[in-house]
Image (cartoon, rainbow, N blue to C red):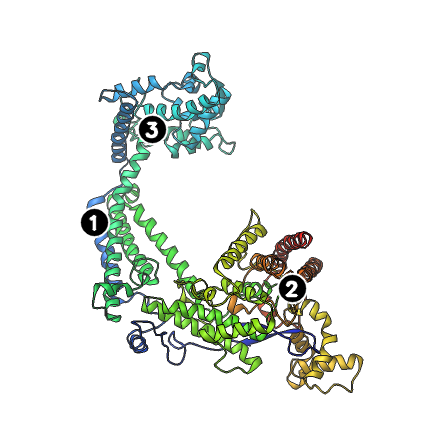
């Protein structure tokens, strides 16, 4: 991965402030999950260097450390087999008859109980139905004959459906005075409520809502177990499933069922009436006692059958997860040498809890797969033995099969995500986002960049010191080592820095105090604090070890606990105010239809790599900079002088192995620093390297820019000129982006950018996607521009 550091040079007043972007290829590898060399925890109370080294010797940090092993697989398979046998013996066949009986019993209990709540004092079902119907008359009952009479109107009248749509049509009837349903052929039928039942329509808005909701519910309860006139078996009401099928059957897509034709509309009617699932004699006539109505009672009964099927599945889950928990807990106690209950606090929950880990997911996949295999094998054998295909479908444990499918999906997706985390390079879209999401209106000079990076590092060191769980602390230390190496390596390319680049705690605050005295301006301190506040520890580093760091989170707040207390510029109240303002500005910039801008958002300004305005001024800057660095080009003039200066800054001509004029232009332009010093005396604002900030997206960068302009440059420093320059820079970016968009539209492909060293990584992004990204970016930039204008005008 190529990482980038932005440093502004302002040492020589005779040389215009420039900014250079130094890039490096991160070739550093970690051995066995640890950085080469000794890894030690910061000493903190009971945790010492010796303890950390001893822990390292006992814990094998390998890429496969959390994968299931042979014992795990044996337990998973055994659990699947045992649970499968329980399913064969206890669950047996999936029975609609049993479902209907169980659902009928539950519905009858509900009807009697609800009637009692309404004031009914008896215990018999018939009395409860009659009482509830009398207390809650229903206006659509006046259209019973219009919808086919007592045996059909519960299905054909949509207001009698026990579902969300049934509630909707009930309310609709109250406000329109009509009933909506179907005729005998399944066609949409709308009929007015007869005069005899208009009294049950509400007189005002409140009554209509009450009759349409509360009255509807209690009337549905009275009809669930059959109407008062047909209690024996009862017509019942359609449940949500049959209701939905009946309602969509009115669509023109479903043709009318003609005599002898089993169309969808007739199929739904037969399903509800019970003739579809009934048994037939040799002459094809329905056997009377085998009629099975598929109404609400049967649909509720299905939950009872699924509950029976769920039992062995739950047993399987409990066995596997319990074994995982117990085994991991014993292993942690042994590895961490825990000898008391109080010391159990050192165990990280994610290391023992039975969910969210690769090994746990794999064990569940294996155990549920074995369970499904036992169940399906039994169903297949019984079906072949009876020569009845329906036997197979009655014997299948659908809950178990669904569990296995879900486990496979989760396991595969998690595996792919883990492999993606282990990739040592970013995908093209991430590269584009990370590089181009920077506005680069603000820069830091080297001393302040060092303070910022040291502050970020201290945030992590402080967090590691307060991490109670040793293994998690070791992972955090691994992340810190890799992150620090990336920062130091980048800075070392330019400044030949040694291992002392990062300032320790006391030295950090001394350096900050010295800089404040030297600059006589504290605006940069606020920007450093804001950048540190945006810093996200334990994010992706693309060094091949990110899967190891997954799930790490800070457990402390160094900025609030230490930073605000040890310097007199930024206090807790000010920092919290910046945090709130950043969230507010970001929300405002994203708008109500904001979406995550990961992978494709950011300020996708293609010309950023060519340096913006700095690119256009590179020919003018190059001779002066080359002369200051001893380029030996004083004897040349005009275009020759410019070419030679750019080639010198690029490390020599291409033929000599250098980067040529393109390299010189890149060195000067970098990301296009459009704002130099802020407030005089060389004080700079900042945008730091991607490795430090984890690549903020456009709304993040624009929000940070707006908050800094409003709260620091204007409110605290009164530097309106700097804000005006930022406004001009944003306007230039918008114009550049619109020009690029037009070029892409006309050419159908992205403009070639031979001076962009990351260009090859972006070739996979299509012009269409680029246009989408750029259009979204323009929208955010325009909002930012408008807000800056408002700030300037109100000043």
| Dot 2 or dot 1, earlier in sequence | 1
The answer for how far apart the CA atoms under marks 2 and 3 are is 68 Å
Work out whether 296 lies above or below 354: above
Rendered residue at 56%/69% (across/down):
688
Per the image, label 3 sits on a secondary structure element best described as loop
Find disc 2 in the rendering and name its residue: 606
Q: Nearer the viewer, mark 3 or mark 1?
A: 1
Which residue is nearer to you in this view: 26 or 5? Answer: 5
The answer for how far apart the CA atoms under marks 2 and 1 are is 63 Å
Residue 574 locus on image (x, y percent): 52, 58
Residue reaching furthest to the left: 89
Q: In this view, does 129 lie to the left or right of 657?
A: left
Mark 3 is surrounded, within 10 Å at the Cα level, by few (under 14), some (14 to 19) or many (20 or more) other residues, namely many
Q: Which of marks 2 and 1 is in front?
A: 2
Per the image, label 2 sits on a secondary structure element best described as helix
Rendered residue at 58%/66% (across/down):
522
Work out whether 744 lies above or below 376: below
Residue 86 disc label? 1
Per the image, label 1 sits on a secondary structure element best described as helix
Residues marked 2 and 3 touching at CB (< 8 Å): no
| Dot 2 or dot 3, earlier in sequence | 3
Which residue is nearer to you in this view: 628 or 678? Answer: 678
| Dot 3 or dot 1, earlier in sequence | 1
Residue 603 locus on image (x, y percent): 61, 60
Rendered residue at 34%/49% (across/down):
402
Find disc 3 in the rendering and name its residue: 275
Q: In this view, does 148 lie to the left or right of 743?
A: left
Rendered residue at 40%/19% (across/down):
138
The answer for how far apart the CA atoms under marks 3 and 1 are is 34 Å
Residue 680 seen from this side: yes
């Amino acid at each position: 991965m190529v990482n980038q550091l932005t440093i502004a040079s302002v040492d020589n007043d005779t040389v215009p402030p420039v900014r250079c972007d130094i890039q490096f290829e991160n070739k550093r590898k970690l051995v066995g999950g640890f950085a080469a060399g000794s890894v030690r925890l910061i000493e903190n109370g009971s945790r010492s260097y010796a303890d950390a080294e001893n822990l390292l010797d006992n814990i094998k940090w390998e890429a496969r450390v959390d994968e299931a092993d042979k014992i795990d697989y044996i337990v998973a398979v055994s659990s699947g087999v045992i649970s499968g046998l329980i399913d064969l013996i206890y669950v047996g066949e999936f029975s609609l008859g049993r479902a209907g009986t169980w659902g009928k019993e539950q519905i009858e209990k509900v009807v009697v109980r609800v009637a009692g709540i309404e004031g009914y004092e008896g215990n018999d079902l018939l009395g409860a139905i009659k009482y509830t119907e009398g207390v809650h008359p229903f206006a659509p009952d006046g259209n019973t004959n219009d919808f086919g009479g007592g045996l059909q109107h519960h299905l054909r009248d949509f207001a009698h459906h026990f579902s969300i749509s049934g509630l909707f049509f009930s309310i609709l009837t109250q406000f329109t005075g009509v009933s909506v349903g179907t005729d005998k052929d399944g066609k949409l039928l709308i009929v007015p409520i007869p005069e005899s039942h208009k009294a049950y329509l509400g007189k005002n808005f409140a009554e209509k809502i009450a009759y349409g909701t509360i009255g509807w519910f209690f009337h549905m309860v009275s009809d669930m177990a059959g109407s008062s006139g047909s209690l024996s078996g009862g017509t019942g009401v359609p449940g949500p499933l049959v209701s939905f099928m009946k309602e969509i059957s009115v669509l023109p897509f479903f043709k009318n069922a003609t005599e002898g034709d089993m169309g969808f509309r007739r199929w739904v009617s037969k399903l509800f009436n019970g003739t579809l699932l009934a048994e037939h004699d040799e002459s094809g006539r329905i056997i009377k006692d085998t009629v099975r109505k598929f109404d609400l009672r049967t649909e509720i009964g299905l939950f009872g059958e699924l509950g029976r099927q769920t039992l062995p599945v739950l047993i399987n889950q409990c066995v596997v997860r319990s074994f995982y928990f117990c085994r991991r807990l014993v292993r942690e106690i042994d590895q961490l040498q825990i000898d008391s209950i109080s010391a159990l606090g050192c165990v990280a929950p994610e290391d023992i809890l039975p969910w969210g880990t690769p090994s746990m997911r794999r064990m569940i996949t294996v155990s549920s797969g074995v369970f499904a295999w036992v169940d399906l094998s039994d169903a297949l054998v019984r079906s072949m033995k009876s020569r009845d295909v329906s036997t197979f479908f009655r014997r299948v444990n659908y809950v178990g099969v669904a569990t296995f499918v879900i486990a496979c999906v989760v396991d595969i997706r998690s595996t792919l995500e883990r492999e993606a985390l282990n990739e040592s390079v970013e995908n093209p879209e991430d590269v584009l986002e990370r590089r181009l999401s920077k506005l680069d209106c603000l820069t830091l000079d080297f001393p302040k960049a060092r303070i910022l990076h040291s502050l970020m590092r201290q945030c992590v060191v402080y967090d590691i010191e307060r991490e109670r769980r040793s293994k998690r602390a070791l992972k955090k230390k691994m992340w810190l080592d890799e992150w620090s190496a990336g920062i130091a390596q980048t800075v070392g390319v330019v400044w030949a820095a040694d291992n002392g680049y990062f300032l320790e705690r006391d030295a950090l605050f001394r350096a900050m105090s010295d800089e404040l005295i030297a600059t006589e301006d504290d605006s940069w301190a606020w920007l450093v604090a804001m950048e540190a506040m945006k810093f996200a520890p334990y994010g992706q580093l693309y060094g091949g070890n990110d899967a190891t760091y997954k799930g790490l989170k800070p457990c402390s707040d160094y900025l609030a606990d230490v930073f605000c207390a040890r310097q007199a510029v930024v206090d807790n109240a000010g920092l919290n105010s910046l945090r709130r303002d950043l969230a507010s500005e970001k929300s405002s910039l994203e708008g109500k239809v904001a979406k995550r801008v990961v992978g494709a958002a950011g300020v996708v300004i293609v010309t950023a790599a060519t340096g913006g305005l700095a690119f256009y001024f590179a020919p003018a800057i190059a001779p002066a900079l080359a002369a200051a660095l001893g380029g030996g080009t004083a004897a040349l003039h005009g275009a020759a002088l410019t070419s030679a200066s750019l080639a010198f800054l690029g490390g020599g001509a291409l033929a000599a192995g250098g980067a040529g004029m393109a390299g010189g232009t890149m060195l000067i332009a970098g990301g296009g620093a459009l704002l130099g010093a802020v407030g005089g005396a060389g004080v700079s604002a900042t945008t730091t390297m991607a490795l430090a900030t984890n690549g903020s997206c456009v709304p993040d960068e624009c929000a940070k820019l707006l908050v800094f302009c409003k709260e620091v440059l204007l409110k605290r420093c009164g530097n309106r000129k700097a804000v005006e320059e930022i406004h001009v820079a944003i306007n230039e970016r918008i114009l550049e982006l619109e020009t690029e968009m037009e070029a892409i539209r006309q050419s159908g492909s992205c403009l070639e950018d031979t001076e962009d060293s990351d260009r090859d990584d972006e070739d996979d992004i299509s012009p269409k996607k680029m246009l989408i990204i750029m259009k979204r970016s323009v929208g955010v930039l325009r909002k930012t521009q408008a807000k800056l204008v408002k700030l300037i005008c109100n000043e």
